Image (cartoon, coloured by chain):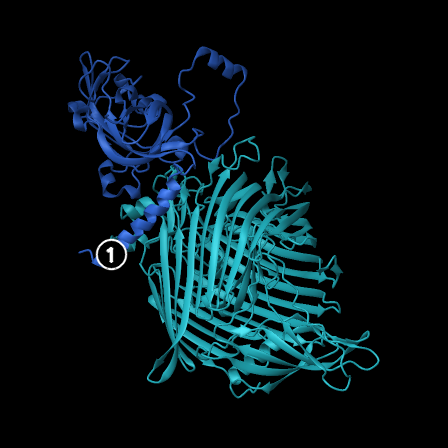
Chain colours: A cyan, B blue
């Protein structure tokens, strides 16, 4: 492991004025090369850095090699290091420093207390005045890379790292690394996942803000549901980390951040080319290719991903392809420019939902055995297609006194069409003499988003606190066409329009956050965010006549809304390892433009949330392990919630709701060998009794379908073995989800779900073979469950009016083999 | 044959499931409201007052009717929580309704009877004279515990969904045959009723019932054919020679009376038999 020890030999000051040595500001540690055997002794690399007058590392040379892999890892890290420049008087100097970098087997960074402010890098030992003509002194700097401080116990900066070995279908599955998250998909492989988080049925994004390196992914007034966010296009190999902020406690959280905010952070640490091909059950094929030039940072990469398969049952075929690319350009010593682009296209079929009674009684139109009935379907005309294109430019300027100025501009274009049939033959009122034409609903959405996002952190030091202030803003404009139509059962031609809206929205938001430590053991953070929304809706589905005669079948609606949301956190350091955080905040979800009235003050769903809990971190340097644990209790109240309506196939308002819950999580990392994370979460979501006090969080009718108990374990173990005198790297990984009984209507519970996924890999030189098994026990599980009225017997059959259970089947055991080739481009000398 | 692996897996799942379910259920039911039940649903032909034979009765017009064939397509059947507006009410309540009438907005369902507490969601061809007045059990039906105060059912020609079971109806909704006798006049008759769409003309709404639905009970829909013949005037039917049955056509008074009466709220009733202790 790496010991971030830097030894700087500085040139002495001129005789006229003492030289102030450079001060380390930021030094992310090197990453242990993955393609080397486990170390048995320390490896030392000495780098010579040229620090320019801005404190940037302008040149890196290897003075003492530790081997190419280690040299490259050390150099890659050094390009991210940042210093306050050496000075002589007020004049900054360009200096050279030699920095030894150690790679040691058992070593680990000093434990950084979780849930605390990052400590400023230890200042250099006070440099003694020295002769100007000779390197007169040396100093030692211990740099430390820590994530930004959490704003609450439920604010998780999750480095994927070794847990990437756990089998996952898509980047969306990475969300399971955060406590209290459950994912469900009723729409097929390519349809956004429904996210359950902290007692929220966050739908496909209505209650969870999703971003990709600052680019918003939630789609306003989407035909399938306000806030719909599809993350299927993200290439998992390029996800470096996630920040999952559960609850609205960070002033930077914006629209849809009701249950929380998820930010995917991209990066490719492994340089060179990695090509991977998989084949498995149900003819699933996956081909990925990612690469990043060795001489560039992990922020420069390209990824291509192709997926195709027949699906795990009838009418579940899918095919999709995506490209993601990013380049980081250095525009001078203090400015970097990141150019990012992504392109994605997907098509999929889906089986939709089935009535439980039909499956139990073997009435589904498939073979009568239980397995065939379970995975059967009614309407084969279900599925969808997506296209998404993203472009983003991010400009990062480092300021003289350590501040930052970040500007980002982004544009997103997407198109989606989805066909789903939840009710069969129930919704249609056919012309007299005709049979029901069917409830298959086509939802289509085309839209473009352009926006700006930025933040400014002045390099201030106030009351001993560096950078106590941050200002940020977001400006987002969406123009979308969102429409839902009913399709005929025979032929699929549209016969009725449910809604047809041209929507334009402008969201302007700004926030200010402050931080201060009035006492040595107390840190206070707080801020306020202000959001405004302007909605302009052109309703294209109005009647062509009314009581006063004929009219134009269109109508315009405009609305405006404003919301201010304060957020605050108190952090008490009980011991160097134990921290107590208490957070409170307000958040908001914008209105679905489809439900607005003209000139109204647009209503928001307002969320009030609070939590308190402990964070603890322990490190054992001798044995090279760290343990981080967190636990908290929380309460949340939402002024206007939405639940799924089968009649429209989207979410509809139900009034206020509230939640009470708790979670605990622990992550144990032992060297680069073992990484285990486990979490357990409980939440109870209710609709409050009319007129009841806000404090009666327990009372009320329980909201159905939202899991109350969720458990998750991710574990990965890596090592090396000698086979035929050859070093072979290996890894085994386990993912386990435990979903407690979900409350169902009529005081019932669903059956609990236990899923186990395992994977094993072996690597020899540049070739790696892997095998993964998802749903190892081949459990028959229901991914989504609903309770409503439907009629799938046919257009002539009498309709049922009694709500009954429907479900979409979860995937059975799926086996996949993978061949991966690593080309590290050894000819590229560091 | 069940493999040991499957046994182990099941035991493991049960263990974990038991622990989780136990933890959750320790707090009671899920709290989502309501309670699901399963009960039996059946059909029965009611005896006319004072009669001991199914299908034999005397009409208010003095005709003694003896049915020899009686079959009909009925269903689906819905049990509603709200009372029928046609149900007899207390005088004060009726007065209040007159003085301050309630607003009747469309609730989205075809009958504003509130929540459906139970249903038989299929059509069935019922032989009224079979079983000798004993209930014919249709099967088990899911429902919601509570008091059902009205029912609604649909009368329609046999649909394709009914399959071959409906062939016996030859496309008709109701087939009756028998003899009507008054004094010395004997009228053998044969009659078929059709109830084509629209659905508003197929429904029998507002049938008053009082059934405290619960697990394992038995709800019986009772058909009251003696009420269907109220006001029928067989003497107006042209009697064919030779004693062959009269084909009662839609232009006749008997046909029209039956067509109206079968869809009246009092043409059917329901009875609830709670589970035996």
In the rendered image, residue A516, in percent from the top left (x then y), is placed at 70, 54
Res A357 → quadrant: top left
Disc 1 marks which residue?
B6
The crowd level at tag 1 (other Cα within 10 Å; few <14, some 14-19, many 20+) is few
In the rendered image, residue A166, in percent from the top left (x then y), is placed at 42, 65
Residue at horizontal 29%, vertical 23%? Answer: B271
Q: Is residue A790 visible?
A: no
Q: Secondary structure at mark 1?
A: helix
The numbered mark 1 sits on a residue in which chain?
B
Q: Nearer the viewer, residue A397 or A713?
A: A713
Q: Is residue B167 above or below residue A34?
A: above
Q: Is residue A41 above or below residue A750?
A: below
Q: Is residue A719 above or below residue A743?
A: below
Number of numbered labels in the structure image: 1
Q: Is residue A586 visible?
A: yes
Res B60 → quadrant: top left
Q: Nearer the viewer, residue A370 or A215?
A: A215
Q: In the image, B4: left or right of B114? A: left
Q: In the image, A481: left or right of A305? A: right
In the rendered image, residue A201, in percent from the top left (x then y), is placed at 49, 48
Q: In the image, B131: left or right of A767? A: left
């Amino acid at each position: 492991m790496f010991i971030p020890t830097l030894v700087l030999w500085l040139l002495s000051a001129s005789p006229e004025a003492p030289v102030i040595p450079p001060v380390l500001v930021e030094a992310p540690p090197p990453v242990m090369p993955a393609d080397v055997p486990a170390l048995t002794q320390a490896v030392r690399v000495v780098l010579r850095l040229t620090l320019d007058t801005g404190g940037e590392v302008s040149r890196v040379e290897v003075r003492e090699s530790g081997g190419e892999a280690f040299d490259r890892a050390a150099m890659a890290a050094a390009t991210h290091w940042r210093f306050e420049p050496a000075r002589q008087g007020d004049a900054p100097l360009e200096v050279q420093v030699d920095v030894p970098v150690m790679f040691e087997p058992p070593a680990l960074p000093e434990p950084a207390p979780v849930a605390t402010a990052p400590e400023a890098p230890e200042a250099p030992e006070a440099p003694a005045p020295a002769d100007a003509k000779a390197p007169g002194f040396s100093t030692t700097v211990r740099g430390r890379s820590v994530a930004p401080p959490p704003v609450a116990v439920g604010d998780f900066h999750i480095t994927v790292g070794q847990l990437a070995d756990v089998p996952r279908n898509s980047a969306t599955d990475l969300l399971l690394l955060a406590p209290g998250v459950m994912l469900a998909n009723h729409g097929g492989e390519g349809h956004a996942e429904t996210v359950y988080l902290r007692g929220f049925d966050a739908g496909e994004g209505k209650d969870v803000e999703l971003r990709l390196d600052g680019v918003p992914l939630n789609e306003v007034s989407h035909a399938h549901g306000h806030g719909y966010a599809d993350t299927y296009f993200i290439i998992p190999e390029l996800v470096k980390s996630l920040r999952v902020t559960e609850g609205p406690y960070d002033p930077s959280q914006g629209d849809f951040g009701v249950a929380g905010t998820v930010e995917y952070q991209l990066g490719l640490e492994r340089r060179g080319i990695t090509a991977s091909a998989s084949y498995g059950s149900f003819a699933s094929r996956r081909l990925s290719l990612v690469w990043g030039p060795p001489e560039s940072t992990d922020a420069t990469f390209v990824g291509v991903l192709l997926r195709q398969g027949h699906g795990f049952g009838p009418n579940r075929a899918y095919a999709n392809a995506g490209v993601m690319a990013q380049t980081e350009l250095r525009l001078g010593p203090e400015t970097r420019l990141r150019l990012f682009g992504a392109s994605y296209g997907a098509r999929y079929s889906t089986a939709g939902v089935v009535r439980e009674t039909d499956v139990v009684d073997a009435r589904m139109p498939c073979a009568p055995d239980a397995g065939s009935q379970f995975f059967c379907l009614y309407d084969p005309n279900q599925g969808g297609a997506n296209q998404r294109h993203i472009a983003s430019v991010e400009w990062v300027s480092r300021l003289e006194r350590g501040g930052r100025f970040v500007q980002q501009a982004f544009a997103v274009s997407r198109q989606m069409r989805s066909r789903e049939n939840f009710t069969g033959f129930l919704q249609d009122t056919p012309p007299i003499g005709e049979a029901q034409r069917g409830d298959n609903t086509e939802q289509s959405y085309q839209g473009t988003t352009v926006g700006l996002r930025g933040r400014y952190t002045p390099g201030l030091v106030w009351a001993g606190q560096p950078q106590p202030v941050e200002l940020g803003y977001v400006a987002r404009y969406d123009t979308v066409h969102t429409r839902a139509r009913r399709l005929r059962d025979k032929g699929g031609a549209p016969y009725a329009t449910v809604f047809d809206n041209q929507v334009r929205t402008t969201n302007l938001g700004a926030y200010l956050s402050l931080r201060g430590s009035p006492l040595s053991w107390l840190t206070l953070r707080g801020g306020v965010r202000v959001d405004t929304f302007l909605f302009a809706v052109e309703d294209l589905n109005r009647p062509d006549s009314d009581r006063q005669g004929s009219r134009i079948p269109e109508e315009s609606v405009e609305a405006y809304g404003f919301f201010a949301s304060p957020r605050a956190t108190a952090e008490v350091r009980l011991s160097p390892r134990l921290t107590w955080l208490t957070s409170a905040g307000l958040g908001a979800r914008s209105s679905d433009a489809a439900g607005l009235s003209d000139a109204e003050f647009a209503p928001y769903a307002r969320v009030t949330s609070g939590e308190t809990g402990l964070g603890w971190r322990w490190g054992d340097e001798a044995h090279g392990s760290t343990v981080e644990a967190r636990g908290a209790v929380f309460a949340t109240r939402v002024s206007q919630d939405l639940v799924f309506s089968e009649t429209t196939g989207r979410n509809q308002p139900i009034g206020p709701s509230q939640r009470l819950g708790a979670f605990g999580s622990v992550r144990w990392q032992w060297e680069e060998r073992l990484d285990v994370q486990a979490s357990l979460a409980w939440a109870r979501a209710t609709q409050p009794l009319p007129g009841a006090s806000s404090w009666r969080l327990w009372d009320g009718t329980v909201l159905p379908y939202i899991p109350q108990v969720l458990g998750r374990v991710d574990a990965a173990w890596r090592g090396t073995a000698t086979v035929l005198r050859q070093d072979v790297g290996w890894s085994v990984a386990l993912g386990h989800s435990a979903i407690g009984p979900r409350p169902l209507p009529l005081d019932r519970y669903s059956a609990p779900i236990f899923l186990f996924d395992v994977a094993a890999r072996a690597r020899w030189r540049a070739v790696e073979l892997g095998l993964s098994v998802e749903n190892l026990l081949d459990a028959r599980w229901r991914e989504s469950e609903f309770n409503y009225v439907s009629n799938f017997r046919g257009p002539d059959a009498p309709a049922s009016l009694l709500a009954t259970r429907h479900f979409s089947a979860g995937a059975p055991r799926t086996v996949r083999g993978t061949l991966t080739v690593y080309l590290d481009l050894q000819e590229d000398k560091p | 044959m069940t493999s040991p692996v499957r046994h182990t897996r099941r035991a493991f799942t049960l263990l974990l499931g038991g622990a989780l379910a136990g933890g959750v259920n320790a707090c009671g039911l899920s709290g989502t409201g309501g309670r699901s039940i399963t009960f039996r649903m059946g059909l029965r032909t009611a005896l006319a007052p004072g009669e001991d034979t199914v299908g034999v009765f005397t009409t208010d017009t003095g005709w003694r009717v003896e049915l020899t064939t009686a079959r009909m397509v009925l269903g689906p059947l819905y049990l509603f929580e709200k009372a029928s507006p046609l149900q007899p009410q207390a005088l004060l309540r009726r007065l209040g309704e007159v003085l301050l009438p309630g607003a009747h907005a469309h609730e989205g369902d075809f009958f504003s009877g509130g929540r459906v507490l139970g249903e038989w969601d299929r059509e069935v061809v019922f032989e009224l004279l079979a079983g000798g007045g004993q209930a014919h059990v249709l099967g088990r039906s899911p429902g919601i515990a509570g008091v059902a105060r009205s029912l609604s059912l649909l009368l329609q020609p046999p649909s394709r969904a009914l399959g071959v079971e409906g062939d016996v109806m030859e496309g008709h909704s109701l087939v009756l045959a028998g003899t009507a006798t008054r004094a010395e006049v004997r009228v053998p008759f044969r009659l078929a009723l059709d109830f084509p769409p629209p659905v508003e003309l197929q429904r029998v709404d507002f049938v008053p019932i009082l059934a405290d639905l619960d697990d394992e009970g038995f709800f019986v829909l009772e058909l009251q054919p003696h009420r269907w013949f109220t006001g029928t005037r067989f003497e107006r039917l042209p009697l064919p020679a030779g004693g062959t049955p009269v084909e009662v056509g839609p232009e006749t008074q008997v046909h029209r009376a039956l067509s109206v009466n079968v869809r009246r709220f009092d043409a059917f009733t329901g009875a609830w038999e709670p589970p035996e202790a």
